Image: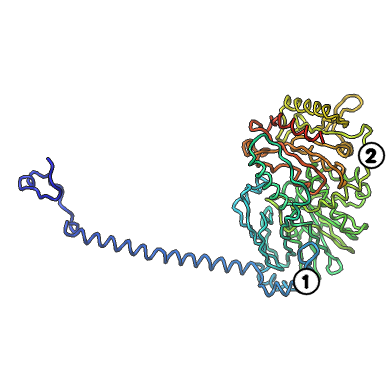
Amino acid sequence: MYRRRGAKNSPQQEARRPQGPPDPPGDSYDDRPKRRRRITFSWCLVWCVSPSILVILLLIIVTIGTLSWHLATITSEQSTALAARVGGVSDQGGLRMNPLVVAEDLKNNVTSSTTTTTTHSIVVAEDLQEDLNNNDTDESSTTTTTTTTTTTTTTTNVTTTQHLRQTEPERQDGVIPIRTTEANESRDILKESPYPKLWVSKNSSYHQMLTAKVERWVLAMHGTGEPQLHEFDTGSSNSTYFAIWTSGGHLVEASAWSILENGTRAYLDAHTYIPPQIAAEKDALEVSGDFAAYHSWWPEFYGHIVDHHLGMLAFLVAKVSEKTRFLLMDVGPFKEILQVLKPDLFSRVTWVSPKQVIKIVDGRLTVSFHPTSSIGPHPRYGANSYLQSWLQSLNVDQPSDGKHIIYYARVKPQATHGRIMDTQHNEDIIAMLQRAMSKHNRTEKLVVFDGTIEDESGVKRHMTYIEQFTLFRSATTVIGPHGTGMSNVVWMDPKPSSQNRVVEFTIGPDNNGEFGDAFREPFAKTYCYKYWGLPFDYNFLVFLSNSTNNRAFIDTKVFEETVNEIFSQ
C-alpha cells in the first residue's frame, strides 16, 4: 500500500514494528548531530595540519640538498681565481690544467675536508644502470647533465653526457683530480656525411625514426669534437705514471697521474680515468722520454679496434712529435694489425699488460680523453678526420683481379653472435646479387666474404688481417648484415672523391626487443654512426619481423630494388 513520505505510523503500526537493540549511551538519536559536528571538526583539523607538515618536510629536504651541493663543490670565487691562474681554455675545449697550480690551490681543502674537492658529474637519468647492462639507452632517454669540476661549474643540455665508473672512487688524502668540461654538441657535425637511405616497402614513419636516430647517435658520438689532451710534464713533478687496470669489456679503466713536489698526487679525472692505485707504484716499469697514451673499450675485439681504437691512435699520432712513443695495451689483435699495416708506427709502441704501471722519467706524458661518455658506456669519437688521413697514408698492393663487390655472409659456423642469416635465404640473396650485376653489366668480381679463404690445397683457413685489408680496399660496394665483418668497410678507398657504397642489414622497428641483444633497438647497431664523415654512401635494409638471432631474413623484393638502383649508377 502506497504511503506518503513523512507520514507518521499509527499506534497499531508502531506496536507491530520490530524493535532493535537500544541505542548506546552518548549515541542516542538526539546526540547524533553533536557527533557529526565532532567528526566534521576532526576532518577540518586534518586538512589544515597536513599541508603544514608537508611544507616542513619539503623545506627539510631542500635544506639538506643545498648543504650537500655546497659541500660537493668549491665556491665560485675559488673557481674564478683558479681558472685565471690556470691560463684559460685549451684548444680542445677544456681548461688548460696545470697540476701544480691545482695542488697549490686545493691542498688545504684536501687535507681538511676531502668532500670539498671531490666533485662528481651528476647524471639525471633513471635508466643509468640499464645503460650499463644493455650498452644502450631508449630513444626517449634524453637527459640533462650537470657537470661539476674543480675549475668551473657548467650546465649543459647535451644528450646523455655521463661520467661512468665501475665503482665510485674512494676519497684519498693527498690525491686531487684534474678535470675539464666536455664541449657542447654541435649540429655542424651532421653536415659531414649524407644521411643514410632507408629502403622499406611500407611505413614512411620509419624514415622519421631513422633520421632522429642518426642525429641522436652522431651528435652524441662526434658532436663534441675531437678528444682533449692533457700533458703531464715531469719537469714540474717528481714522476709521472700511467696504467690500464682493466683487460677488456665495455668499461676499461685507466689512471694517469703525477707526484708533485709537495707529495700530492694529481690524476686525470675523466670518462673511465680513475684515481691511481698508489700501492702499485713500487712495481712500476720505468721508461724515459716522451710518451703518449689513450685507452678505450673492447680492446680484445677486432671490430672495436677497427671502428674506434684506430681513430684514437691516429689522433694521437697527429698531435705529438715523431720522437714520441705510444703506450698501448697488449690485448687483442691490435699489435698484429699495426705490425702488418704500419710497421714504422708499430716500432714506436711500448706494449703494456693490464695492471702494469709505467713510470715516465725525463720526459712528458700526453694523454687523450673525453670528459664524458656519449650514450650509456659508449665512448665519444670525434677523430674520424685523423683516421681518414692515416688510412690514406697506408701503402696497399691492389689485388690482381681488380675491383670487387663484397657480400658479407653472416652464417654459421663462422658467425655466432646473433643476426645470423638463414642459410637458404643467404643463398637466395647471393643469386639475386649475381643477376643484378649481370643485368647492369658490372665489371667487378663478386666475393662472398665470411672471414675465411681456401688455400691452394682447398683447405679453409681464417684470412689474415692484411688479406682482409687488401680485399676491402679493392671494394666498390659492400653488402651484408651488421656484424664484425662489416667493420672492414673502413678499409675501403678513403679518398674524399670516393663513392663507396654500403648496404647494411640492421634492426628495424618490427623486431625491437623480441630476440635479445641482437635485436635490441631499431637502427642502433650500425657502423654508419661510427664512421661518420668517411666517404660512404650508406643504405639500410631492416630485418623482417620473423627474424630471430639464429635465422634472420630481409625483404627480397626490397633488396632487389636496392641493388638494381645502386648498380645502375
Q: Quadrant of residue 451?
A: top right
- The kind of secondary structure element at disc 1 is helix
The amino acid sitting under disc 1 is Val
Q: Point out which mark residue 276 bears.
A: none
Horizontal side of 73 relative to 284 (left or right) equals left
Q: Earlier in the sequence, mark 1 or mark 2?
A: 1
User: Looking at this view, is 472 or 261 the one in front?
Assistant: 472
Label 1–label 2 contact, CB within 8 A:
no
Look at mark 2 in the image and give the residue it sits on.
Answer: 397
Horizontal side of 65 relative to 565 (left or right) equals left
Look at mark 1 in the image and give the residue it sits on.
Answer: 86
Q: Position of residue 24 (x, y in %)?
A: 18, 55
The amino acid sitting under disc 2 is Asp
Label 2: few (<14), some (14–19) or many (≥20) C-alpha neighbours in 10 Å: few
Q: Quadrant of residue 507?
A: top right
**Against 490, is 371 above or below?**
below
- Report the residue at 73% width, 24% height from top: 424
Q: Position of residue 511 (x, y in %)?
A: 64, 36
User: Looking at this view, is 556 or 65 the one in front?
Assistant: 556
Q: Going by the picture, which residue comes out furthest to the left?
A: 12
Q: Which of marks 1 and 2 is in front?
A: 2
- Separation of disc 1 and disc 2 at Cα? 50 Å
Q: Where is residue 19 in the image (x, y as percent from the top left)?
A: 12, 46
